[in-house]
Image (spheres, rainbow, N blue to C red):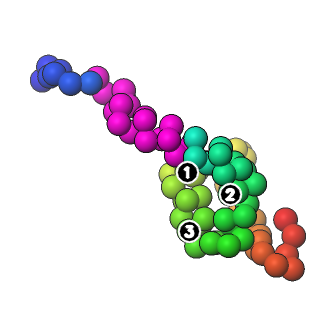
Amino acid sequence: MGAGPGRPKGVPNKTTMALKEMILGALDKKGGMDYLVDQADKNPVAFMSLVGKVLPMTIQGTGDDGTITVEIRRFGPGNSA
């Protein structure tokens, strides 16, 4: 089946690109990483949802057997990183 009209596969939609640029611009104006750290404290559920959206969907270990070690840390009042 031949390629039809429209943008080629893998080329981002212009609206999506513009929206992403606006979001990143707003984040920069709010303080970037410092703002995200503040949101992690104030809104941990929403922050973890955001983290879940930016993490890769597939994780592969680098050990000889491909295993992965997961370390879970709790962040918040009275806990340090």
For the residues labelled 1 and 2, the Cα–Cα distance comes to: 14 Å
At 57% from the left and 43% from the top, the residue drawn is: 24
Q: Are marks 1 and 3 in contact (CB under 8 Å)?
A: no
Give the residue at mark 3. 46
The reply to whether residue 69 is in sight is no
Q: Choose top left, top right, bottom left or bottom right for residue 68.
A: bottom right
First along the sequence among labels 3 and 2: 2
Binning the other alpha carbons within 10 Å of mark 2 as few (below 14), some (14 to 19) or many (20 upward) gives some
| Residue 33 falls within the magenta-colored stretch | no
First along the sequence among labels 1 and 3: 3
**Observer-nearest residue: 64 or 25?**
25
Single out the mark in the foreground, 1 or 3: 3
**Observer-nearest residue: 73 or 62?**
73
On screen, residue 8 above or below 56: above
The residue type indicated by label 1 comes to: Val
Estimate the x, y position of residue 1 in percent, counting from the top left.
12, 23
The residue type indicated by label 2 comes to: Leu
Give the residue at mark 1. 54
At 36% from the left and 26% from the top, the residue drawn is: 11
**Boundaries of the magenta span:** 8-24
Q: Choose top left, top right, bottom left or bottom right for residue 62.
A: top right
Q: Are marks 1 and 2 in contact (CB under 8 Å)?
A: no
Give the residue at mark 2. 36
The secondary structure that dominates the magenta segment is helix
On screen, residue 9 above or below 34: above
